[in-house]
Each structure stands twice: as C-alpha cells, then as structure tokens.
Amino acid sequence: METMDERPLYYDFPTFLKRYFPFKVQKISLDAGFTCPNRDGRCGRGGCTYCNNQTFNPDYCRGDKPVAQQLEEGKRFFARKYPEMKYLAYFQAYTNTYGELSKLVHMYEEALSVPDVVGLVIGTRPDCMPPDLLDYLAELNRRTFLMVEYGIESTRDATLRRINRGHLWADTVDAVNRTAERGILTGGHVILGLPGETHADIVAQAADISALPLVTLKLHQLQLIRGTRMAREYAECPEDFHLFGVEEYMEVVMEYVERLRPDIVVERFLSQSPKELLIAPDWGLKNYEFTNALRRRMRERDAYQGKKYEM
C-alpha cells in the first residue's frame, strides 16, 4: 500500500469497491450452464481457439448445480476465513447473456435472493447484449450493484478473426457504449500476447481501450491450455507464437498501464491456470507475487497509470 504522500501506482479494484460497500465483498464464480454463439453455430463452431473454461472454474462452480446451490457452496468456502463477508454473484463461464430473456432474469434474480449476495457481475460477449435484456439490466441496476464485463480480448479485427472470436472491434465499441449509456458499470477483459500482435500493437491497444467508457479492465497474459485449438496450432507452428517471459510481460504491462486512462480500474494483471491444464508459459507465480513485483518495478521507474495517457 502507498503512504499518504505517495502517488497511487494504479487504480486498484479493492479501492474501487470501497466506493460502493462499507464491508468486504468477494466474487463467487458461477457456471449457469450457458454456451456461446461461436460454439453452437450462430456465428461459428468450436469456440475461441484459446478457450477452456475449466481453467477458471473452482470446484463448487458446476453447470449441473442450481445457481443458489453454487452460491451457498461458494459462501461456505470463503466464510471460513472471513465470516462477515458479503458476496457478488459472478456469472463467469461462457456467455451469460446468451439465452431466453425469461431464463436469464430467473437466474439473475435467483442469485440475488441468496442471503449476503449484494450484487451481480455478468460476464459476456459484445455481440450478446440485445435491447430487451439491456432494458431489464438498466432496471436491475437501479436496485442492486451491477457490472457487465465484456470479453474484448483484442482491438484488432485480424486478431479477433484468427482466434475465432466471432465478433469484431466495432461490436465491442457498440456494446460498451450502449451499456454505459444506461448507467451500468461496464468492464472489459483483454488478452496480451495473442498470435500476430507485436509489443507495439499491445501497448498501442491501451489508447483504444481508454477511448471506451469502461470502468474496469482485466489484463491477462496469453496462456496455452491443453485441449484447445490454439494448443494444437502451437504444436504445429510454434514460430507463429511469442510467449512472454515474466520479465518481458512485466515491461509490457507497465507500458500499457502508463498509457491507460487514469480513472479505469485495473482489476488484475495475470491469469492463473491449473498446472495440469497449462502448457506454457509456466512462471510459477501467483497473482499477488506478480503484482508485488510489478509494483516494485513501477516505483523504481516512477511509472504510474496514465503517465503517458493522451486524450
């Protein structure tokens, strides 16, 4: 933590949450049994080339369990350490706005009916926010904490096509703007190091992201995961990929954050996948270890969020 006379290095998520809650809150990940439009044939087959949702689903998070049961099991998991904790229901796996409106409303309301759940975070894609659902979410936003988090992944259409994302950058711009215009907190997620993107491309991305009315942003390094199409592509043509070492990734993140709009909340810098699924890169670092090392590096360089941001 910075002292009172030190400049904050970046706008972190715990600081952001304190604006809304006078108590500790924890996200509980949910798998509500959804799929994606680039899996079921609406806009593609096979899903994103990098995707294996097992990489972030905890044991209690299984699509064959009701939402309320997953939340209760998640609460028991976290309450051992923090008995007074409150919770945000995090609809995380796959595309959580892709379905019949009545089914979506039922699941969201079921989550909010669970004791000590004080809000929702809904993960989705930019091409899956129909007007009628947005109308409902705008109403929901008036009675509870709500954030919609879009998987942006890249700002380059060539990259989005290469990873079989099924949407383009224009879809992201449209969805983020429509959501933010309704007063809903809007987050984004990007993957740094996707095939075909150079160091310069990645750093330049920060300007495009900053032009969106995003409140929060997650940064993740590219990871190759067993059972994915990208893993097969890497095995066949490893020269098409540049996998970051931890020091190089730290430099990229620092340059990116310096060019990021200073009021965007940087929720995380790193993704951790289960060792049994991870092919590469395996840095052997936990999130907090990387974050602590990054903060030390930023202090040494007098780097901070927005230092090189241009309107």
Image (cartoon, grey):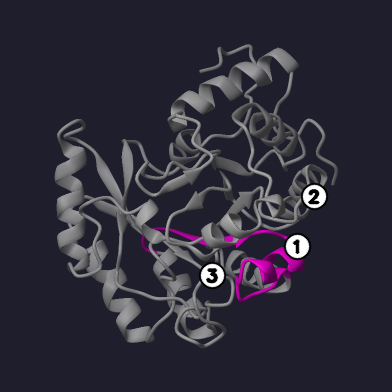
- Marks 3 and 2, the one that precedes in the sequence: 3
Residue 159 is inside the magenta segment: yes
Q: What is the spatial separation of the Cα atoms under label 3 and label 1, in whole angstroms?
A: 16 Å
Q: Are marks 1 and 2 in contact (CB under 8 Å)?
A: yes
Give the percent coordinates (x, y) of residue 29.
32, 54
Residue sitting at 60 percent across and 70 percent down?
Answer: 165
Left or right of residue 37: residue 155: right
- Marks 1 and 2, the one that precedes in the sequence: 1
On the image, which quarter does residue 119 sit in? bottom left
Give the percent coordinates (x, y) of residue 57.
32, 54
User: Could you tell me the amino acid type at mark 2?
Assistant: Asp
Q: Nearer the viewer, mark 3 or mark 1?
A: 1
Q: Identify residue for label 1.
A: 156
Left or right of residue 197: residue 187: left
Residue sitting at 59 percent across and 21 percent down?
Answer: 295
Q: Are marks 3 and 1 in contact (CB under 8 Å)?
A: no
Question: Around disc 3, counting alpha carbons within 10 Å, would you say few (fewer than 14), some (14 to 19), or many (20 or more)?
Answer: many
User: Could you tell me the amino acid type at mark 1?
Assistant: Arg
Judge by depth and name the residue closer to the eye, 252 or 265.
Answer: 252
Q: What is the spatial separation of the Cα atoms under label 1 and label 2, in whole angstroms?
A: 9 Å
Q: Magenta stretch?
A: 143-169
Q: Identify residue for label 2.
A: 201
Left or right of residue 83: residue 23: right
Residue 248 is inside the magenta segment: no
Secondary structure at badge 3 equals loop
Judge by depth and name the residue closer to the eye, 83 or 220.
Answer: 220
User: Could you tell me the amino acid type at mark 3?
Assistant: Arg
Give the percent coordinates (x, y) of residue 233.
59, 61
Q: Identify residue for label 3.
A: 125
Q: Are marks 3 and 2 in contact (CB under 8 Å)?
A: no
| Residue 135 is at least partly visible in this image | yes
- Marks 3 and 1, the one that precedes in the sequence: 3
